[in-house]
Image (tube, rainbow, N blue to C red):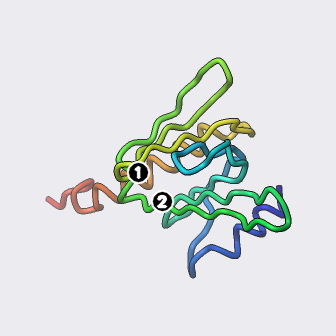
Amino acid sequence: MSSIINSLGTVLHEEENIIECLTCSLVSHYCLAPLPGLLAATNKRLLFYGLSASESTKELVEEFAYIDITSIKEKRGITGKHIHMYYNDDFFKFQQIEGMNMFDFMAAVKEKLCTITNPAKERYPVR
């Protein structure tokens, strides 16, 4: 997993840090099959770094600006935990989540969403 995180480091912007990350698979309208990879919450955005299936294919990097995430929820089903996310008008599902830090990951994302949608001035009014 550390090699995947190192690869993810190549797509981070200046002064961007990983807060939490999960290994999972992405299911969306443009993936024919679940795509394994790493979902990372950074201080600036969510990133999905999909692993390439072979040497001839390039890895997929999807970025999701916090401001454009309209909904993100943890779901539990027969096959395990999932994350359902609406980004603009598109639906993304992250499944086959590995690791015990799902709660920490969701808490970090929701905190970032809260700070983006409610600037400090609105959250803590000056009296």
Identify the residue shown where x is 42% and y is 58%. 66
Q: Quadrant of residue 112?
A: bottom left
Q: Left of 22 or right of it: where is 16?
A: left
Query: Alpha carbon of mark 1 to alpha carbon of mark 2: how far?
Result: 7 Å
x and y percent of residue 20 in the render?
63, 53
| 113 or 23: nearer the viewer | 23
Which label's residue is closer to the chain start, 1 or 2? 2
Coordinates of residue 110 in the picture (x, y in percent) = 45, 46
The reply to whether the C-beta atoms of the residues labelled 1 and 2 are less than 8 Å apart is: yes
Would residue 102 appear left or right of 99 to someone viewing this image?
left
Q: Position of residue 58 (x, y in %)?
A: 73, 68
Residue 18 figure quarter: bottom right
Residue 87, disc: 1
Residue ID at (44%, 50%): 111
Q: Secondary structure at mark 2?
A: strand
What's the residue type where badge 2 is placed? Answer: Phe
In front of the other: 106 or 123:
106
Q: Is residue 82 left or right of residue 127?
A: right
- Name the quarter where the N terminus is drawn: bottom right
Residue to which mark 2 is pinned = 64
